[in-house]
């Protein structure tokens, strides 16, 4: 899952754009949403909503100093005018225990609509806890699926059933995971900039040249950074795309029938690449640290994989100086044509929803253009829209992430796959740590073990 709401709250990233006047009765940041809305329906009822990580109350961004409009105020100024007869009972669920809390609410029948992580949503669906929304879409002539990026609308496990036949969610927030390089460091080392669609070979070659003592500053530099303890090992996903590996054949709704392909030559190359990259990263990368200065003036890392650019955009919004935007350049991911892992957090409906029609109205509102605009301008959430015209022209991080979302198709190498999360990621992270600490683990043996475990896991699902 993207967990971008959590990051926005923790870092305090909030736009922007215009001033600190009033967009509604709250006196919060202007132009983040339209309060001049009319009633659109006389639907009535109570809809119970559980939001993972959303900020409910008004606040202030710690970096920009601008006021932020929380969800409660936004609803007061918009939704209550549009649907005056629908009562929202909203629960904010911290990301730390969102999966367990939301699953409990679904199982007990105490929730109707949820915002959650993409992997959580796919698991809830496979457990039979969510409602398909195809019938609601079909009967709603005003709902237009084409407003969403079609690459994720048609393909994401976070919103669509594993067999691709049913829609159960609406994409609300997109993860930002692009490759970003420091042009200043590249220039100091005399290295050509990264290609718009860099290959793993290009990244590794240039990272090797930049690891060592900077010829201009005399400081220690590292060629690249990626999270060695990643919960979803997004770098491995991109590499699997590049080397043409899907992890196997089959669908997640029929795990017993999956024909696993985890110990193939392509998978060996992907994992070996991670081992080579591990030697070029700051030592603390094995714990998810070591790139704290990336995006700032005193950076010492040439490029970062699967990065959001959030820190860089936040600094720009705080001081309106585009020097860092000129220095840190986003490009596409390492997969074929720039593909990579795309996180999508959806709006979903409980199987036991008490009032599906009213719940559907709430779902549409939470994933609408207007709500995504509010979410972006207040909390820097990445939109899932085909036409997100409220995103700044110089925000290449989001633009690249959205391009990637249009072309990336999930495979079994995805966090929605329980075996991938529970077995493959820990094993690969262990391999990365061992290499970083001077070891030379046997990649083929590692993948052979994973292949055997995967086959046993599928057999246990019958």
Image (tube, rainbow, N blue to C red):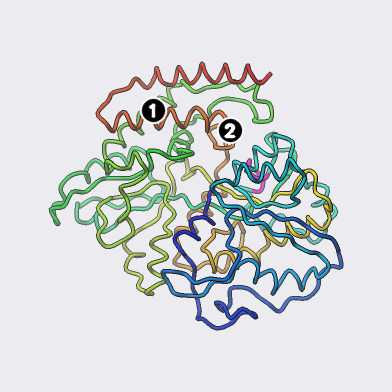
Label 2 CA crowd tier, 10 Å (few <14, some 14–19, many 20+):
many
Residue 269: give its label. Answer: 1
- Asked if residue 428 is positioned above or below residue 5 in the image, the reply reads above
Q: Could you say which is closer to the camera, residue 276 or residue 314?
A: 314
Residue 100 left/right relative to 144: left
Label 1 CA crowd tier, 10 Å (few <14, some 14–19, many 20+):
some
Q: Secondary structure at mark 1?
A: helix
Q: Could you say which is closer to the camera, residue 239 or residue 19?
A: 19
Instruction: Identify the residue at horizontal 29%, vertical 57% (top origin).
Output: 183
- Asked if residue 394 is positioned above or below residue 214 in the image, the reply reads below
Q: Which residues are magenta?
A: 153-159
Residue 8 placement (x, y as % from top left):
49, 60
Q: Which residue is mark 2?
A: 417
Residue 154 left/right relative to 440: right
Instruction: Identify the residue at horizontal 57%, vertical 40% (top origin).
Output: 409
Residue 174: give its label. Answer: none
Residue 334 placement (x, y as % from top left):
42, 42
First along the sequence among labels 2 and 1: 1
């Amino acid at each position: 899952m993207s967990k971008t709401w959590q990051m926005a709250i923790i870092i305090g990233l909030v736009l922007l754009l215009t001033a600190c006047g009033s967009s509604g009765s709250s006196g919060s940041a202007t132009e983040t949403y339209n309060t001049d809305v009319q009633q659109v329906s006389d639907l009535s009822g109570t809809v119970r909503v559980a939001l993972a990580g959303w900020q409910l109350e008004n606040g202030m961004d710690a970096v920009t100093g601008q006021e932020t409009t929380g969800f409660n105020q936004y609803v007061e100024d918009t939704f209550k005018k549009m649907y005056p007869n629908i009562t929202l009972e909203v629960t904010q669920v911290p990301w730390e225990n969102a999966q367990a809390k939301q699953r409990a609410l679904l199982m007990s029948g105490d929730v109707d609509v949820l915002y959650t992580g993409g992997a959580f949503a796919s698991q809830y669906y496979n457990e039979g806890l969510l409602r398909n929304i195809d019938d609601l879409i079909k009967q709603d002539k005003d709902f237009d699926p084409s407003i969403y990026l079609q690459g994720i609308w048609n393909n994401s496990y976070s919103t669509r059933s594993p067999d691709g036949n049913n829609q159960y969610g609406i994409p609300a927030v997109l993860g930002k995971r692009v490759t970003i390089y420091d042009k200043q460091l590249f220039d100091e080392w005399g290295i050509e900039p990264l290609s718009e669609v860099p290959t793993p070979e290009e990244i590794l070659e240039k990272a090797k040249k930049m690891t060592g003592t900077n010829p201009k500053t005399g400081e220690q530099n590292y060629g690249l950074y990626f999270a060695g303890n990643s919960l979803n090992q997004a770098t491995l996903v991109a590499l699997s795309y590049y080397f043409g590996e899907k992890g196997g054949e089959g669908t997640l709704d029929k795990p017993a029938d999956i024909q696993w392909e985890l110990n193939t030559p392509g998978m060996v190359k992907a994992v070996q690449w991670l081992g080579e990259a591990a030697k070029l990263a700051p030592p603390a990368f094995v714990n998810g640290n070591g790139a704290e200065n990336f995006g700032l003036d005193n950076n010492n890392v040439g490029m970062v994989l699967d990065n959001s650019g959030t820190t860089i955009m936040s600094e720009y919004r705080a001081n309106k100086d585009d020097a860092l935007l000129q220095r840190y350049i986003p490009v596409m991911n390492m997969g074929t044509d720039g593909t990579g892992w795309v996180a999508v957090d959806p709006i979903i409906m409980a199987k036991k929803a008490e009032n599906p029609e009213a719940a559907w109205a709430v779902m549409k509102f939470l994933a609408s253009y207007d709500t995504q605009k509010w979410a972006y301008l207040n909390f820097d959430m990445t939109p899932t829209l085909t036409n997100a015209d409220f995103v700044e022209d110089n925000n290449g991080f989001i633009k690249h992430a959205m391009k990637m979302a249009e072309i990336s198709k999930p495979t079994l190498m995805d966090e929605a796959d329980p075996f991938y999360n529970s077995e493959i990621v820990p094993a690969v992270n262990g391999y990365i740590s061992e290499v970083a600490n001077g070891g030379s683990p046997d990649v083929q043996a590692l993948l052979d073990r994973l292949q055997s475990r995967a086959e046993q896991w599928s057999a246990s699902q019958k």
